[in-house]
C-alpha cells in the first residue's frame, strides 16, 4: 500500500471512530509511525484528508449507479445490494461520507455537497424511471428518494460483517421492503412483479 493511501485509510478509521475534530494530526502521525513533520510531506492539511476520504466513498457509491442494468425493479435491487456492499466493504469511509463531511469548510464543503447530490440524483433517476414505466407508484419523487436513501444509509450505524445477518440476506430483505414501499407487489428476488402475476 502506498504511503498516501495508507494515510487515507488510517484517517478514515480515526475520523469514523473518534470524529474529525477529535482526531489530531499528531495522533494520525502516531498511528502511521511518522513524525508530525513527515506527515505533511504527503498531505497539506487534515481537512484535505477529510475531503479525500469523502471523495473515495463517493466514487464507490457512484460506481454502483454506473453498473445498474435491466428494468426499474432490477435496478432498484442492484442499487440496494451495491449500496450495502459499499457500506460493508468501506465502513469507515462510508461513515465519514454520511456523517463527518459536514465539518468541511467552503469551498471544500461545496465539493462534498456536490458529490452527495450527484449520488442522490442518480438514485432519484432510478425511481423516476420506475414511475414513468408504471412500475413504481410514487406520489412524491423527492420524498421517495429520501426515503430509500435514509433506509439504506442508516445501516452504517449498526451493520457489522461478523453480525448475525449476512449481507446477501440484508440486501434481499431491504430490496423487498423498499419495493413494496414503492408500490411493487411482493415477489422473490430475481423475479419481476409483472412476470409473477400472484403474490407469494
Image (tube, helix red, strand yellow):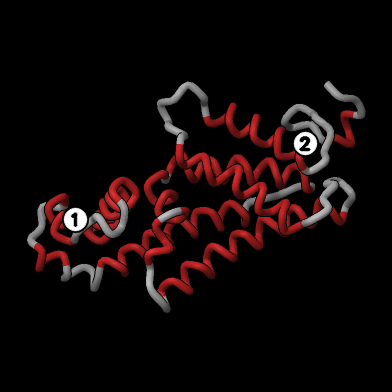
* Residue at disc 2, secondary structure: helix
Q: Mark 1 sits on what residue?
A: 28
Q: Quadrant of residue 163?
A: top left
Q: Say if 82 sits above or below 3 in the image.
A: above
* Number of the label disc, if any, that sits on residue 46: none
* Number of the label disc, if any, that sits on residue 180: 2
Q: Which residue is drawn at 27% across and 55% down?
A: 11
Q: Position of residue 49 (x, y in %)?
A: 30, 64
Q: In this view, does 128 lie to the left or right of 53?
A: right
* Sequence-wise first label, 1 or 2: 1
Q: Residue at x 72, y 59 (%)?
A: 142
Q: Residue at x 79, y 31 (%)?
A: 191
Q: Where is residue 93 in the image (x, y as percent from the top left)?
A: 39, 51
Quarter the C terminus occupies: top right
Label 1 to label 2: alpha-carbon separation: 45 Å
- Which residue is more in the foreground, 42 or 20? 20
Q: Residue at x 86, y 24 (%)?
A: 199
Amino acid at each position: 500500500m502506498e504511503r498516501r493511501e495508507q494515510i487515507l485509510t488510517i484517517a478514515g478509521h480515526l475520523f469514523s471512530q473518534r470524529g474529525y475534530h477529535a482526531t489530531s494530526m499528531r495522533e494520525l502521525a502516531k498511528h502511521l509511525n511518522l513524525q508530525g513533520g513527515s506527515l505533511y510531506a504527503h498531505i497539506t492539511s487534515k481537512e484535505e484528508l477529510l475531503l479525500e476520504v469523502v471523495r473515495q466513498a463517493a466514487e464507490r457509491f457512484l460506481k454502483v449507479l454506473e453498473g445498474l442494468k435491466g428494468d426499474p425493479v432490477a435496478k432498484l435491487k442492484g442499487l440496494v445490494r451495491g449500496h450495502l456492499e459499499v457500506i460493508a466493504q468501506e465502513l469507515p469511509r462510508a461513515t465519514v461520507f454520511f456523517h463527518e463531511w459536514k465539518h468541511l469548510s467552503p469551498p471544500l464543503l461545496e465539493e462534498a455537497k456536490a458529490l452527495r447530490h450527484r449520488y442522490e440524483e442518480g438514485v432519484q433517476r432510478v425511481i423516476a424511471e420506475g414511475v414513468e414505466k408504471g412500475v413504481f407508484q410514487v406520489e412524491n419523487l423527492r420524498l421517495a428518494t429520501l426515503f430509500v436513501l435514509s433506509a439504506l444509509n442508516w445501516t452504517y450505524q449498526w451493520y457489522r460483517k461478523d453480525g448475525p445477518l449476512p449481507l446477501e440476506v440484508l440486501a434481499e430483505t431491504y430490496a423487498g421492503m423498499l419495493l413494496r414501499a414503492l408500490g411493487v407487489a411482493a415477489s422473490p428476488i430475481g423475479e419481476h412483479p409483472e412476470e409473477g402475476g400472484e403474490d407469494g
